[in-house]
Image: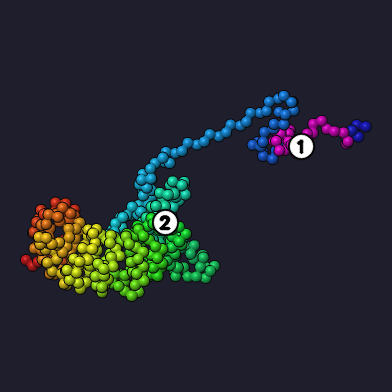
Amino acid sequence: MKKFMKLFGKSKTKSTVTADDQYFDKPASKNGKKFGMYGNHSVPDFRQTYKHKFQDAPPMPDVPRRLKPSLAAKLPNEILAKIFTFVAPHVANESLYSDEEILHSVNGCVLCDTRDLAHIALVCLKWSRVAQTLLYKNIQLERVHYCGREEQLDELRKRRSRVIYTDPDTIDTAAERMDLLIRTFGLNDDLANYTFFIRLQYMTRESCKNVLTSLVNVPLPNLRWMDLPDGFYKDDPACQALKAIMYQKCPDLRRMRWTEGSENGFLGLSIDRPWSNLEFIELWKLNVEEDQIAGVLATLPKIASVGIQELPWVTSRFLSPGIAGKRPLLPPLKSLSISKCEKITYDSIIAYISSPAVQQTLEHLTLKEIDFPPHLIYQILQKLPYLKTLRINAPRHPP
């Protein structure tokens, strides 16, 4: 009988686990473990609360308090923009010079800094607006990373070439990045309005003329400076499409250059007036007369800097002060550069800077290959109280 009870009788120590116990994480005594769908963090057991008719319901859990906005969210956009420039220092460069003309003062990798600034734009909506303005204000397209990441990317390109059978050396990364930029502007027209400067390396702008034409055709109404191929300044037929589009869709350019062979383009500036906001113009090896240059300068109300180099038809009369009742040929400027102009003498330069209007405005003066006696530099310093930089490269006189 005892053997029969052991086989078919119920054990008092054995516990059973129901489906409700598994859901509500009700402990069962088996090796000190709990049986439940969610472990120790499952739904609490409120079944016993409603057994009695007049028993109160359990209290509701506390609602989590709303987090207070951080102090960074209260900063004005101007302060945020200033802080973000330390992440990507190249966006603060607003000069009208290319990297070949000035020393590269920004340390670090431009592409990595741009990537970090793009990550900042993903933090919140307010930061996104400020960061996007900086990202597209000063666009600098580089071919390679100037850091250790370029080696990693080179290995990835080689792996990809094994799959799609392409030579990694033939991949033009700069052209691909410009294509992506054109696609971004096509999807969002407002971003094109943020662009003020586009900086390209020499090989990039010389080999991607067709892509540059497509980029300018977006359009870019607020573009002030863009690195252009040398043929653009010479009226090269290969750059005529690019120049025609910039005439129409980039009216806010601030700097332009005309070199040998572009006399018609320069003289047509006073008739068509495509870039009335020009502030800095350069004339190199042009066969134009002084009165023609003065006529073009008269149509540019914001002109502040002029650079002339190897102009055979320009004489000292170009720097002579205006006669009473007449405007001088060369207006008062902030920056003046004269290089290799044999017919411009030292006396004409002194006569130009003796004008009271010039003395109040001229800040930068550059004289190269001019017959200028070195011992008379003090006369320039006396007449220009607001002068900041003075560069003189005079030929050596025999003793």
- The answer to whether residue 177 is seen in the rendering is no
Q: Quadrant of residue 210?
A: bottom left
Residue at (51% x, 65% y) in the render = 160
> Where does residue 191 sit, x and y in percent of width and height?
42, 56
Q: Determine the secondary structure under disc 1.
A: loop
Residue at (10% x, 53% y) in the render = 382
For the view shown, which residue lies furthest in the top direction?
A: 54
- Asked if disc 2 and disc 1 are in contact, CB closer than 8 Å, the reply is no
Residue underneath mark 1: 18
Q: Is residue 64 above or below residue 163?
A: above
Q: Quadrant of the N terminus?
A: top right
Residue underneath mark 2: 191
Of the residues under marks 2 and 1, which one precedes in the sequence? Answer: 1
The reply, left or right, for residue 260 in relation to residue 383 is right
The reply, left or right, for residue 46 in relation to residue 82 is right
Give the magenta range: 6-34
Q: How many marks?
A: 2
> Where does residue 3 sit, x and y in percent of width and height?
90, 34
User: Given the image, on which type of amino acid does mark 1 rest?
Assistant: Thr
Residue at (43% x, 47% y) in the render = 127
Q: Quadrant of residue 277?
A: bottom left
Residue at (39% x, 62% y) in the render = 219
Q: Is residue 376 above or below residue 13?
A: below
Crowding at mark 2 (Cα within 10 Å: few <14, some 14-19, many 20+): some
User: Given the image, on which type of amino acid does mark 2 rest?
Assistant: Leu
Marks 2/1: CA distance? 62 Å
The reply, left or right, for residue 4 in relation to residue 245 is right
Instruction: Answer whether residue 27 is magenta in the image.
Output: yes
> Where does residue 83 sit, x and y in percent of width and height?
37, 46
